Image (tube, grey):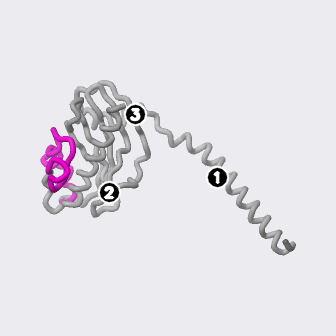
Amino acid sequence: MKKETLRPTLVLLCICAAVGGLLAVINHFTSQAMIMDPAEVVESLKEDYLAILPDATEFELLYPTESGIPEEKGTAVQVVKTNAGYLITALSSGQYDSSPIRVLVGIGADGKVVGVRILKSTETPGVGSRTGSDSFLNRFVGGEYFSADGKTGVKVDTVTGATKSSKAVIVAVNAAMDAYAEWSAQ
């Protein structure tokens, strides 16, 4: 290799090594800050947990993950085992808004849904936000798997004018049921 091409190559190699080293140091110090204490996670959602499973007194966080945008249509992001059942938080995309709906699903010891609560939704007020109403969420109570058409589970009528948002909630509840099936079998 000629000297003219060797020098820029060495300079670029040194820059890459320096940047890589700097990123490794930053990751070392910041990765510890991203780890959430399980007790803090449970405490931050305890009011929501008790609204769904009021008899729960013991909470064990089994599966925490980041709460980013789900890679699939529906993704369980937290599983909490209690003495009264499971509390599973799931995300679902597929609605008009680009932000996923965050849904908390309570599942009793019998494997049936005992309650559903929307934890976060940026749906249009008065339209998509109606999926957070008790009249819609109570349609899930007592069931196991759900669909808008009744072909792949208990039929859940969607909210008029909020069909995509309703289907996103259905997908999140089914993702929670999948997570329950996986974790309760362990």
Marks 1 and 2, the one that precedes in the sequence: 1
Residue 73: x %, y % from top left: 33, 55
Write the residue at 79% across / 64% down: 10
| Gap between marks 3 and 1 measured at Cα | 30 Å
What residue is shown with label 1?
Answer: 23
Identify the image quadrant of residue 143. top left
Local crowd size for mark 2, using a 10 Å CA cut-off: few (<14), some (14–19), many (≥20): many
Residue 31: x %, y % from top left: 56, 43
> Compared to 84, does 98 lie above or below?
below
> Compared to 12, does 29 lie above or below?
above
Write the residue at 32% across / 46% down: 90
From the viewer's perspective, tell me whether residue 3 is left or right of residue 27: right
What residue is shown with label 3?
Answer: 62
| Gap between marks 3 and 2 measured at Cα | 24 Å
What is the magenta range? 127-155
Q: Is 85 covered by the magenta stretch?
A: no
| Gap between marks 1 and 2 measured at Cα | 32 Å
